[in-house]
Image: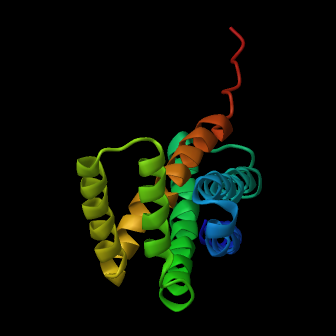
Amino acid sequence: MKKTVLTFGIISGVIISVLMGITTVFADRIGFDRAVVVGYTSMLMAFLFVFFGIRFYRENVGDGEISFGRAFTVGILITLISCLFYVVSWEIIYYNFLPDFADKYANHVIEKARASGATPEQLAKQMEELKGMKAMLDNPLLSAAVIFISEPLPVGLVMTLISALILRKRRRKAEVPV
């Protein structure tokens, strides 16, 4: 299982990291709203390797059969490796190449709120929340934990559950003639 998990986890991790890096670097040019859509679509593409990894394991290690539990285990391990790649990439990109990302994002959110007719009180509340987000992003450990839990992990968990359900397969017991 280790080789399958590592192989598909690393492939998924490289894909998710590269696509996230490209999306993040160009987020202010393509618009933060579009960047979110592109980002989650990229995650779905990368997490397709959870499905492929489970299927590979079923066909090549499990002789064509796999339980839901084993499929889920293979899938969640691939997901965790991919998520780790995502978080490490985010930390490298944020701290080395985009230290102003939080400020640009905050400006986008405030302008969007203003355009939608937010009151000064709502804008002040929004600014305080955004300051909290920036403080969180400026703490590498807290940032890593929050990014891991809130961005790639939920998508990967859903892909793992769906893949494990679709790919589970047990051999039918041979019918005994009466």
108 w.r.t. 173: above or below: below
Residue 158 at x, y = what percent?
Answer: 53, 44
Residue 139 at x, y = what percent?
Answer: 31, 81
Residue 97 at x, y = what percent?
Answer: 57, 88
Residue closer to the observer: 123 or 163: 123
88 w.r.t. 27: above or below: below
Q: Please report the residue visible at 54 percent of the width from the left and 83 percent of the height from the top.
A: 98
Residue 141 at x, y = what percent?
Answer: 32, 80
Residue most toward the bottom?
A: 96
Describe the colour scheme in one phrase. Answer: rainbow
Q: How many marks overall?
A: 0
The answer to whether residue 170 of the structure is visible from this angle is: no
Quarter of the image where one finds residue 163: top right
Residue closer to the observer: 126 or 151: 126
Q: Please report the residue visible at 70 percent of the width from the left and 73 percent of the height from the top.
A: 22
Q: Quadrant of the C terminus?
A: top right
Q: Position of 115 compared to 74: left or right?
A: left
Q: Quadrant of the N terminus?
A: bottom right
The answer to whether residue 19 of the structure is visible from this angle is: yes
Q: Position of 153 compared to 130: left or right?
A: right
Residue most toward the top?
A: 178
